[in-house]
Image (cartoon, helix red, strand yellow):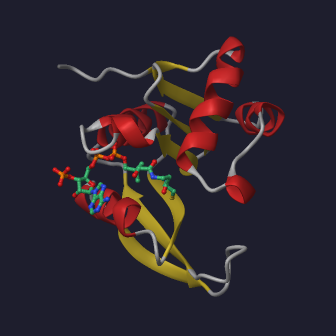
Amino acid sequence: MTLEPRPVLPADLAQLEALHASAFPPGEAWSADALGVMLALAGGFGLLLENRGFILARAVGEEAEILTLAVAPLARRCGAGTALLAAALRRAADCGARELFLEVSRNNIAAFALYAAAGFTQVGLRRRYYADGSDALVLRRDLSAA
Ligand SMILES: CC(C)(COP(=O)(O)OP(=O)(O)OC[C@H]1O[C@@H](n2cnc3c(N)ncnc32)[C@H](O)[C@@H]1OP(=O)(O)O)[C@@H](O)C(=O)NCCC(=O)NCCS
């Protein structure tokens, strides 16, 4: 089965809210309004795998960043996260970005494994960055080969 994400449209915000709520703990889930604000940021874009997951990112100049990535629990370990991330890498490179950054909790084993497999390496550390007191690892991926 091919996993080909499509661009997020404003009409998708309710679905994005439901997917985000399924993927993150209650205090960390984003509302449709908050997701809309992220999408409307300069250079913001989103990619969706219907009813499975989505990724939001932004690309400004030569830098891009992942804003959030969420895959519904029942859709995990089937390559959705990898497909969304790969599509975001391509889109950011197409927009002219040369490097892509993201933050991930030191405790998020699944996400860190996904990002490491996609070629991200740690370039920084933000101590007690998250509400639960965990540290954020700052990861970077060169986009010249994306
Ligand atoms: C992280 C997340 C997006 C991964 O999505 P996914 O669709 O399951 O990812 P994939 O199926 O593409 O997995 C790719 C690889 O990542 C690693 N991985 C994914 N989930 C893992 C887990 N629970 N434990 C260990 N490694 C894991 C594996 O190496 C996996 O390859 P494999 O299945 O061949 O072993 C998903 O678990 C999720 O939405 N988590 C909650 C939200 C979140 O943490 N978002 C990221 C915030 S920075």
**Who's the residue at 28% across and 23% down the image?**
3
- Quick one: quadrant of the C terminus? top left
Q: Residue 52: percent from the left, percent from the top?
A: 43, 29
Q: Looking at the image, can residue 58 be seen?
A: no
For the residue pair 71 and 62, the one nearer the viewer reads as 71
The image quarter containing residue 19 is top right
**Who's the residue at 81% across and 36% down the image?**
37
**Who's the residue at 31% across and 56% down the image?**
114
Q: Residue 46: percent from the left, percent from the top?
A: 57, 30
Q: Residue 144: percent from the left, percent from the top?
A: 32, 48
Q: Is residue 145 left or right of residue 73?
A: left
For the residue pair 73 and 65, the one nearer the viewer reads as 73
Q: Residue 24: percent from the left, percent from the top?
A: 59, 52
Residue lying furthest bottom in this view? 127
The image quarter containing residue 15 is top right
For the residue pair 99 and 116, the one nearer the viewer reads as 116
Q: Looking at the image, can residue 48 be seen?
A: yes
- Quick one: quadrant of the N terminus? top left
